[in-house]
Image: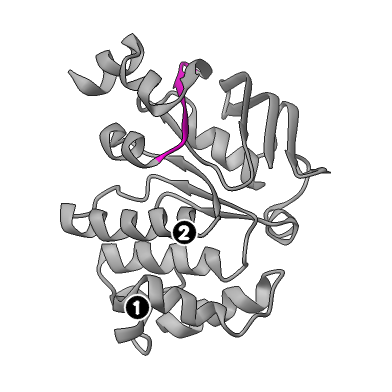
Amino acid sequence: MLNVSKLSASYGAIQAVRAIDLSVKVGQFAVLLGANGAGKSTTLRSIAGLHRPVAGSVRLGEREISSLPLHKVVGAGLAFVPEGRMVVAPLTVEENLELSRFSGRNRDNGLIDHVYELFPRLKERRGQRAGLLSGGEQQMLAIGRALMAKPQMLVLDEPSMGLAPSIVDLVFQAIVRLHKEGQSILLVEQNAAIALSVCDYGYVMRRGQIVVEGTPEKLKESPEVLEAYMS
């Protein structure tokens, strides 16, 4: 379980996140919605160890991880797929996956087969340099790299950004399958319609604070969501 309590974080000189609480239960698929600048990415980066919170607690299971650097957060069981993908461009698809496997907490040789099963296109391009992949293929690879750590919690920041609708469908089919297999997921996503169609629970941020939370059915009827996404 991921438990975020009274988390505050700054982006430069601006306090971007103000004492928020959120949690993701084991096996749950939670989504964090909000307009640009609401504090969503700062929240994820603070959870993942890329950004040190100003105050508050981030716990994964029984372990406090808010003060840990990224590589130790990964070792604790949380994998983060940031906006922008961040694959290692000169390495091949398979080299990217192998690198993540050996830097993660699990050396299971079967993990790479699971990634290729989720994303057959990556298997077809296993020998191709990551920098030559399309944007959608790089997003698949970024998710695959995160899975090679066999995380307890998978955190994704805007996986649909800049992708063609057909590729978005493929990416979300894989994410939904991971959830059905028991993977715990926290997702930031601008496409609220897609996010609310697949998640179990959701939060909406505005100006660094959580303003509403609940089931997808509740959020679809929320004035904040209706005004921002459904009009």
In the rendered view, does 25 fall on the left or right side of 187?
A: right
Q: Quadrant of the N terminus?
A: top right
Residue 224 shows in the view? yes
- The residue type indicated by label 2 comes to Leu
- The residue type indicated by label 1 comes to Leu
Residue ID at (46%, 68%): 144
Q: Which segment is the magenta one?
A: 199-207
Q: Which mark is first along the chain, 1 or 2? A: 1
**Residue 216: x and y, percent?**
39, 28
**Residue 158: x and y, percent?**
38, 45
- Most foreground residue, 6 or 88: 6
**Residue 86: x and y, percent?**
45, 61
- Most foreground residue, 28 or 5: 28
Residue situated furthest top in the rendering: 223
- Most foreground residue, 95 or 153: 153
Q: Determine the secondary structure under disc 1.
A: helix
Q: How many numbered marks have been drawn onto this rendered protein structure?
A: 2
Q: Main secondary structure of the magenta part?
A: strand
Q: Determine the secondary structure under disc 2.
A: helix
Which numbered marker is on residue 178? 2
Q: Quadrant of the C terminus?
A: top left
Residue ID at (41%, 59%): 177
Q: Quadrant of residue 58?
A: top right
The residues bearing labels 2 and 1 have C-alpha atoms spaced at a distance of 17 Å
Q: In the image, which is nearer the foreground, mark 2 or mark 1?
A: 2
Residue that numbered label 1 is attached to: 122
Residue 125 shows in the view? no
**Residue 228: x and y, percent?**
28, 18
